[in-house]
Amino acid sequence: MDISFTGHRALVTGAGKGIGRAAVKALRAAGAEVIALSRSLEDLESLTSECPGVETVCVDLGDWSATEAALTNLQAVDLLVNNAGVALLQPFLEITPEAIDRSFDVNVRAAILVSQTVARQMIKRGMGGAIVNVSSQASQVALQNHSVYCATKGALDMLTKVMALELGPKKIRVNCVNPTVVMTDMGRANWSDPQKAAPMLNRIPLGRFAEVDEVVHSILFLLSDKSTMITGSCLPVDGGYLVT
Ligand code: NDP
């Protein structure tokens, strides 16, 4: 199944590392113009040197006014990947207000702000578009020390569905992907300990964690014209973890 994004322009958040960075490269390889948004300038600089032609926006999505300002002159896009996220793990009884605020600001509030900006442009142009939110299996299953992270991803799943409901009549599709563990920086920080990883791996019918490209392929499918009747869905990319 060939997917081409020639003639399309995409915005990817959290594009400096991990899944977002790989999504930028895959979209570019498939012909899209791409705007890469992330927090660390050095990541964006190395991305543009590897991937010439990618435009960049450097902003902390946790800062609402800085993000609004950074998006003011954003060129219209018809594809959006809300990928930026943080995983600040704490036992429930030790959750701090700082971790709650940071997690919801980046994982939920920023997805709302960026999507509002992009969707308004899409509606103005009347051409429709597609949005993919990068959620997690943690939206649907309880994981030790993940209260706040699970809550943000549960919120993102429901945000996806309501956005699909309200934006569908404007020809904007909204879906999310829900990966299991992926060994990015985030995955390594939280799942490198074999003793912690083993029970998770044992519950995954396919017996392994996801590769970055497996998540990216699902994102590209949901952005593409191969999924034109799919909206409001939460697609597990979990090797079957959520069936158990
Ligand atoms: P990484 O930590 O490897 O990369 C995240 C990227 O997002 C980094 O470039 C980071 O920049 C950027 N980012 C984080 N916070 C902000 C912010 N406030 N403003 C702008 N950019 C920001 O994460 P992954 O690639 O693993 O994760 C991507 C998405 O996938 C996340 O939403 C995550 O929750 C989800 N996911 C990940 C899983 C995993 O196991 N890895 C499993 C399931 C879902 P910087 O480093 O400069 O902060």
Image (cartoon, rainbow, N blue to C red):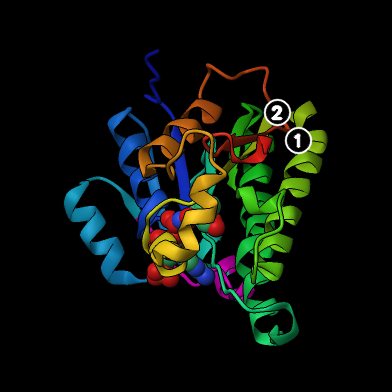
Q: Residues within 10 Å of mark 2 (few under 14, many from 20)?
A: many
Specify whether 17 is left or right of 158: left
Q: Secondary structure at mark 1?
A: helix
Q: Secondary structure at mark 2?
A: loop
Disc 2 target residue: 231
Foreground pick, 208 / 59: 208
Labelled pair 1, 2 in contact (Cβ < 8 Å): yes
Q: Position of residue 26 (x, y in %)?
A: 33, 36
- In which quarter of the view is residue 176 placed? top right
The answer to whether residue 75 is magenta is no
Magenta extent: 56-68
Q: What's the amino acid at mark 2?
A: Thr
Specify whether 1 is left or right of 222: left
- In which quarter of the view is residue 87 placed? bottom right
Disc 1 target residue: 164
Query: Closer to the N terminus: mark 1 or mark 2?
Result: 1
